[in-house]
Amino acid sequence: MSKNIAIIGSSGAIGNAFVEHYLKDNAVEKIFSFSRSVNSHTSKKIYSFDIDIESQESIEKAASYLEGCYLDRVIIASGVLHTESFQPEKSIKDLNYETLSKVYSVNTIGPALVGKYFLPLLNKKNKSVMAFLSARVGSISDNKVGGWYSYRSSKSALNQIVKNFSIEMKRSNPNAVILALQPGTVESKFSEPFKKNISKDKLFSPDFSVDMMSKVIESANSSSSGNLIAWDGEVISP
C-alpha cells in the first residue's frame, strides 16, 4: 500500500531527518514538505510548500494544497525553545509577555491549528498517525527542577491538545492515532546552548532519533492514541 506523508517544519534538523527517512521507504508514494522556506529537492516523491506556523491563514492555505489527497502520516516537527532574543527562563523574574507569546504561538497554538486543518485529511480506511513533537519537560509530574516556564507549559498545553484530538478522532476516524512524541535530546541549533550539560550517550543525532520515533509511530495503535511517548517507546506520565 502506497503511503502519503506530510511533514510540517521540514527545514529543522528533526523535520529534515523525517523527510530523508521516508524518502528511503519504498512504501511511501508522496512526501508533502512544509516549512517557512521552501526547500528544493531532486526526488519526485517530494512536494514542497511554504507554511508559517504562526499564521492561521497560512496553515489553512497549506492544507488546501492537499485537497482530495488522504494522508497516512503527519509529523509536526516545528518548535522553539530559544532565539537570539531570549533564552529559557531560569526564574520567575525572567518571565515576560513577549517570550511567552512567541513560545506558545509556535509550540501550542500553531500545532493546534495544524490539527484543525490537517486532521480531516487523515486516511479513514486504514491506520493513520498524526504525531506532534513534544517534550518530557512538558510532563507536570516529571518536573523536579522548575525553570523553563514558557517551554514547559507550552508543551504541557500541547500534550492536552493531543489528548483532546485523540478523543474526538475516535468518533470521526477510529483508524487515526494521535501522538505526542519526545525525541530525546537531539544535536541541533535547538539544543546547541545546552550540549555541555548532556552526556554524549544521551545526545542523539537527528537520524537516530527519527529512526527510533518512526518505530514508535509504526507500532502505535488505538490504545496509544493521546499519549506522550518517548523515542524509546516509554509512555511518559502527564
Image (cartoon, grey):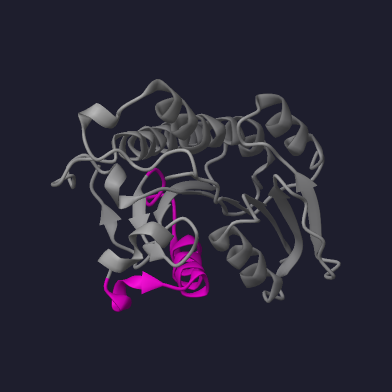
- Picture residue at 36% right of the left edge, 39% below the top: 151
Q: Nearer the viewer, residue 39 or 211?
A: 39
Please tell me whether residue 25 is drawn above or below residue 233 in the rendered image. Answer: below
Based on the picture, tell me whether residue 221 belongs to the magenta stretch. yes
All told, the count of numbered labels is 0
- Picture residue at 36% right of the left edge, 71% below the top: 203
Q: Nearer the viewer, residue 31 or 105?
A: 105
User: Which quadrant does the N terminus fall into?
Assistant: bottom right
x then y, percent, for residue 77? 54, 51
Describe residue 91's horizontal placement relative to residue 119 as left or right: left
User: Which quadrant does the C terminus fall into?
Assistant: top left
Q: Nearer the viewer, residue 107 or 131?
A: 107
x then y, percent, for residue 82? 44, 45
- When asked about the image quadrant of residue 20, the answer is bottom right
Based on the picture, tell me whether residue 22 belongs to the magenta stretch. no
- Picture residue at 24% right of the left edge, 40% below the top: 90
Magenta-colored span: 199-226
Describe residue 221's horizontal placement relative to residue 175 as left or right: left
Describe residue 148's horizontal placement relative to residue 70 as left or right: left
Q: Residue furthest left?
A: 144
x then y, percent, for residue 191? 41, 59
User: Magenta stretch: dominant SS?
Assistant: helix
x then y, percent, for residue 102? 49, 31
Q: Nearer the viewer, residue 203 or 76?
A: 203
Q: Residue furthest front?
A: 85
- Picture residue at 40% right of the left edge, 28% below the top: 100
* Residue 172 seen in the current view: no
* Residue 174 seen in the current view: yes
